[in-house]
Image (cartoon, rainbow, N blue to C red):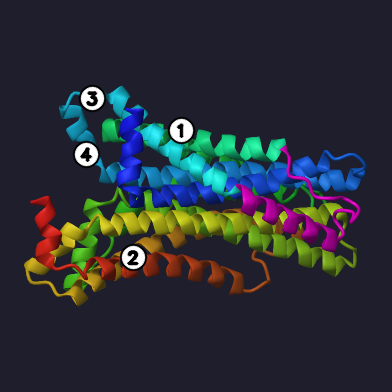
Amino acid sequence: MFVLAMRSIRHRPARFVSTLLSAFLGAAIIMMFNSLQDTAGRPGVDAVSRDTLTTSAGVVGGYGSLLVFFAVASTLTVNVRRRTAELELLRCSGATPAQIKRMVVGEAVAVALIGAVLAIGPAMLGGHALLGAFHDSGQVARSVDYSFGLFALVSGVGVTLLAAAGAAFLAVRRAMRRREQRGRARTLLAYAALGVGGTAVTSTFAFSAKDAALMAPPAYGAILLSVGCALLSPRLLTGVLDRLRPTGASGWLAVRNLRERVHQLAGILMPLILFTAMATATLYMQAVESDAIEASGLKKSVETKNLETLNLTVVGIIVVFVCVMLVNSLYAATTYRSREFGQQRLAGATPGQVLRMVAAEGVIVTVTGVCFGTVAALAGIVPFTVVRTDSVLPHQGIGMYLAVVAVSVAVTLGTSLVTARRVLRAPAVEAVAPAA
């Protein structure tokens, strides 16, 4: 099966571009930040600089590892779903489920290894630039020289390969299991995340305004609440669709299609909810904290600068990975519908009507993801703002929130419409013929 996996990659490399991109970005980020751990281990590094470097490497490296898994899992899930007929043909030809799993995992590991190797050079350059930024902000002494060592290399390659293997195994296993079994496990995890997240957010009121760890409970609570909402995204989208009263042929058809593809759209809603909640909560809580320190007349300590740097860096990583996940998922999902679009055109629909239908679907999905992500973010922002400033909502305005929403709308609608327009270039007869 390993030989078959290698032949599959060689003959259809375009299928694995999204997985390669996710592995490349993930390995680059992990190696870039974990190289700070190698730098901190050099002789002669002072205690303050060492603490800054190790904290950055640990926090961002952990977030990066988690996001690598989600990004690779998202692309592999869509890839496996598109290959249902191929995998079924292999089973009919005598391949066992275990052999099919080994083939899919072998493909994912091979592609991830290529992506990790390609990421070494950019990771070294990015780590050097990151250390320069720490030098300029005074968080790390200028006498500290950059080092890209064994820890960065092994952790980057190892985490990427493990994430690819685990995500591929879960994707093909999910494709072969009953939907009801998957639904029960997802529901249990969702309610567990909501329960722990709600507890963390509520515990914020047990802290005082001057506590150094004040930001941790609401931040992690908002993240867990967004994870719970993301896991429940099929049910949430179904509830939204049940309350919609669409007008026009394109709107009616969009709602109808969304009802039939609720479980498939979970791969799009999940990153949307996570991105909106995590980016909004982190940016506003950091802005409230910075303004509160400035209003008190105190100078920012090294620890405060480290926290601010980490928060902004984490948001940046989230933006990159969510964009990759959304673009990959939307591109694959829209391309997969070429036969559906061809049938609609043969039934009398114009390309403009099909594009309006895709746009209506994108608007519904985007609004749903942004709304539930906003609720999760507010659940963390409000307790933090009440304790830190004695006001319910932050006074920083809605500019940052509108920027987060703009990114969500641009990525979701832009990818959907551009891909749909590209699919519609093919004649309707040719789009339907391969599946006949």
Name which of mark 1 and mark 4 comes first in the sequence: 4
Q: CA distance from mark 2 to mark 1?
A: 28 Å
Q: Is residue 61 magenta?
A: no
In the picture of the structure, the residue carrying the numbered disc 2 is 416
In this rendering, the answer to whether 251 lies above or below 72 is below
Give the side of residue 306 with respect to residue 281, left or right. right
Nearer-the-camera pick, 143 or 169:
143
Name which of mark 3 and mark 2 comes first in the sequence: 3
Name which of mark 4 and mark 2 comes first in the sequence: 4
Q: CA distance from mark 3 to mark 1?
A: 21 Å
Q: Secondary structure at mark 3?
A: loop
In this rendering, the answer to whether 303 lies above or below 295 is above
In the picture of the structure, the residue carrying the numbered disc 3 is 95
The reply to whether the C-beta atoms of the residues labelled 3 and 4 are less than 8 Å apart is no
Name which of mark 3 and mark 4 comes first in the sequence: 4
The reply to whether the C-beta atoms of the residues labelled 3 and 1 are less than 8 Å apart is no
Main SS category, magenta section: helix
Identified by mark 3, the residue type is Ala
The reply to whether the C-beta atoms of the residues labelled 3 and 2 are less than 8 Å apart is no
Q: Secondary structure at mark 2?
A: helix
Question: Where is residue 413 shown, x and y percent of the image?
Answer: 37, 68
In the picture of the structure, the residue carrying the numbered disc 1 is 166
Rendered-image quadrant of the N terminus: top left
In the picture of the structure, the residue carrying the numbered disc 4 is 86
Identified by mark 2, the residue type is Ser
